[in-house]
Image (cartoon, rainbow, N blue to C red):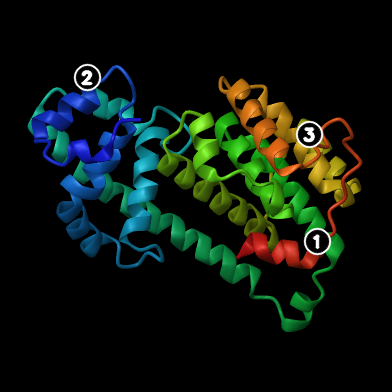
Amino acid sequence: MRVIEQYNNFSAADYYDAVVFSSETPVEAVYYLLQQRLHRALHRVFELHGFGLSDDFNDTIDDFFLYLYDGNQTGDPPFDIMNGIQNKQAFFGWTVSTYRNFLLNKAKEEIKRNVLQEEAWASTDEERKGLSEETMIDYLASAIAYADQCFKPCNLFIFYRFLLSLLDHSRAIPQEEMAEAMKLHPVTYRVRSKRQRDGFQRFILSQEAGHPLDLDSQHEGMRECIVNGFKQLYSLLMGYYNLVLEQLSTKEAIKALRLQCYQERGIVMHENNPYGYRFNMNVRTFYKVLKS
């Protein structure tokens, strides 16, 4: 990883060359471009168009940074467009303009999310108290299966790791070390993790508002498997975690990191015994934590 501070004195032309003509994705250059070089311009845009958002300015920059690389998980990411800009002066202008459009779309998404939340809480107090553990398990199982259906492999791996760490924090490997093993910048990892958690919350809220998730036949079977084996959720998730791990180009580095960390802590792995690890977290508590 290059040191971020080296971009401190970059001119517009320098940034353009680093981002457009670099042989590798210049993660640090783009992040520093947003946080430092264009900070004032982007903050002015936020003051004009971000006043209705619950996220603060820095949170929106983190989300925007990831958006430039991933888009909305469909189609070509905006970074491909950035790479195609031929005019150096248009490079900064395009970035600021894209941030403005990003904020406007984010505001629309937040309005929709708030409507879902209001619908979910529009029921009477008696109905809210009557949300059974069986219903919560069903919502969680459907949301996990839908995430497996929708998320890209890298993002899905980060999502499973988040759930496993929540169920047993003692086994969690520091994010910075996992990011390095995955060849991701720590900021990229952190923002991707936030995006997947936000998506999962929306999946739960959608169900509470009476809008079931559209699962294909494969993931409907996965939902049933999770519901029936919920007491072994940690082991089930570990199985899905390992399946998606095999799809990653960095799988060997991740396996080596996990083995090293587990050996150092004296922790026993349970991959060879998929139903031998029970989690004892209260279902209602687990559900509440995932929604918070």
Residue 21 is marked as 2
Q: Secondary structure at mark 1?
A: loop
Q: Quadrant of the C terminus?
A: bottom right
Crowding at dot 1, Cα within 10 Å, few <14 / some 14-19 / many 20+, comes out as few
Instruction: Say if residue 223 shows up in the picture.
Output: no
Total tally of numbered discs in the picture: 3
Q: Is residue 233 left or right of residue 204?
A: right
Q: Is residue 142 above or below residue 280?
A: above
Residue at left offset 67%, top offset 55%: 211
Q: Is residue 165 above or below residue 148?
A: below
Please state the horizontal and vertical placement of residue 234, each as a whole percent of the image: 80, 46
Residue type, mark 3 in image: Gly
Q: Nearer the viewer, residue 44 or 270?
A: 270
* Residue furthest top in the image: 23
Choose top left, top right, bottom left or bottom right for residue 90. Answer: top left
N-terminal label among 3 and 2: 2
Q: Nearer the viewer, residue 268 or 72?
A: 268
Question: Which residue does the numbered mark 3 point to in the structure image?
Answer: 239
Choose top left, top right, bottom left or bottom right for residue 173. Answer: top right
Question: Which residue does the numbered mark 1 point to in the structure image?
Answer: 281
Q: Secondary structure at mark 2?
A: helix
Q: Is residue 20 left or right of residue 109?
A: left
Q: CA distance from mark 1 to mark 3?
A: 19 Å
Please state the horizontal and vertical placement of residue 169, each as a whole percent of the image: 68, 53
Residue type, mark 1 in image: Met
